[in-house]
Image: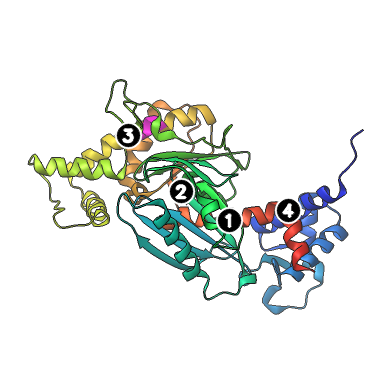
Amino acid sequence: MRAINIKKMHEVNISLLLNTIRVNSPISRSEISRLIHLSPSAVSNIVDLFIKTGFVSEVTNDGANVIRRNRKLILNEERYFPIGIEIENDRILGIVINLVGDVLKQELTYFSPNTDYKEILNKVIEIFYTLVKDFSSDQIMGVGIAIPGSIDTKQGISIFSPNLGWRNVHVKEFIKDKINFPIFIEHNVKAVTLGELWYGAGVGRDNLICVRVGSGVSAGFVIDGNIYQGLNGLAGEFGHTVVEKDGKRCRCGSYGCLETYVSTQVLIDRVLEGIREGAYTQISLENKTREQMLEEIFLVGKKGDKFILNIFEKMGEYLGIGISNLINIFNPGLVVIAGGLARAGDLLLDPVKKTVQLHAFSPIPEITTSKLGSLTCAIGAATLVIKDAFSHPQKRMEALTV
């Protein structure tokens, strides 16, 4: 018979209890005991430790003096703060959040194409220290960094990022001497998925798919409450599934990949091409930045411009076919569309839903857009830090109680 690891069992109970408070807050000790089938005394002992170390606060109804076991427990919003940083094609976004996902501070910087990875990572370090300067070191939980492309999350290596032109960049190794806090590296779509699961459209859902449509297309999968990583952590390259045999050449070298038909850049290119060819449209993209172009396209489309509507109809059809395939394979309860194209709202959602109705098996899941907007990926990156603390709380709590 295998021996019972009491310390490991205790840590599992701590993690379970902490996440129960996170999901069900505000919640009483007695309610926790019923939910997780742990004795009231064990619950109280762990909760007292949470309160001592600052993870959890107690609240009462309008300050009423109710007995302790019925006081409500919430995560402490004012004690610990993780940092989330998203590296994109041409920009770095950094944020500070609290334990309930509120964004307290953000910083944004841009870099030019073909910028050396060392310069980009030095900008990451600069943003980190700009974000943390208003906090004491014992308040900072760590930093999560989200990067496009294939990632070795354990070693913190960017194996290949076509968007950034990186191959085998040792991200964690480069910054660990400059940032003396826990560091987590993750693929951007998995960070987005985690952010939606904990704080966005996916709260309370155990099975969902998050499709990120920006400069590329990727997907994250939540199965029974856990993010699916794949054998080597490389699951999610949804944009390189083939939707057109012998179709357009993709930057990955294949042909007919989904992201050659659906992305923010594809949208801009198709609009510019139509304007050059004399399409009847109200839109003008002269002297506008890339972001301004996207906002103008969304605005004119929502006003009913048929040229723009036709582009979204075709893009939505391709994306809908891809999502239908995912639904038929994974049978999710929810599909969340995030990324730059999610800002188009119903312009994209309507043709996607129409296509899914034609091609996916019933029951058709809810399909919606991100609730976290343009900060989704950075919030998800910061959530990596909280998730680790909540999954392995024993060491952190022992250090705090010394």
Magenta segment: does it hold 237? no
Magenta segment: does it hold 318? yes
> Pointer 2 and pointer 1: residues touching (CB < 8 Å)?
no
Q: Is residue 50 left or right of residue 133?
A: right
Q: Amino acid type of disc 3?
A: Arg
Which class describes the residues within 10 Å of circle 2: few (<14), some (14-19), or many (20+)? many
Residue underneath mark 1 = 183
Q: Amino acid type of disc 4?
A: Ser
Q: Earlier in the sequence, mark 4 or mark 3?
A: 4
Q: Amino acid type of disc 1?
A: Ile
Q: Considering only vertical position in the picture, is 25 above or below 67? A: above
> How much space separates mark 3 and mark 2, taking CA atoms?
18 Å
| Location of the C terminus (image quadrant) | bottom right
Residue underneath mark 2 = 147
> Pointer 1 and pointer 3: residues touching (CB < 8 Å)?
no
Q: Earlier in the sequence, mark 2 or mark 1?
A: 2
Q: Secondary structure at mark 1?
A: strand
Residue depicted at 49% across the width and 65% down the height = 128
Select label 4 or label 3 by which is in front: 3
Q: Which mark is residue 15?
A: 4
Q: Position of residue 368 (x, y in %)?
A: 43, 45
Residue depicted at 58% across the width and 56% down the height = 183
Residue underneath mark 3 = 251
Q: Position of residue 384 (x, y in %)?
A: 58, 53
> Pointer 3 and pointer 2: residues touching (CB < 8 Å)?
no
| Location of the N terminus (image quadrant) | top right
> Pointer 4 and pointer 1: residues touching (CB < 8 Å)?
no
Q: Is residue 148 left or right of residue 152?
A: left
Which span is picked out in magenta? 316-322
Q: Amino acid type of disc 2?
A: Ile
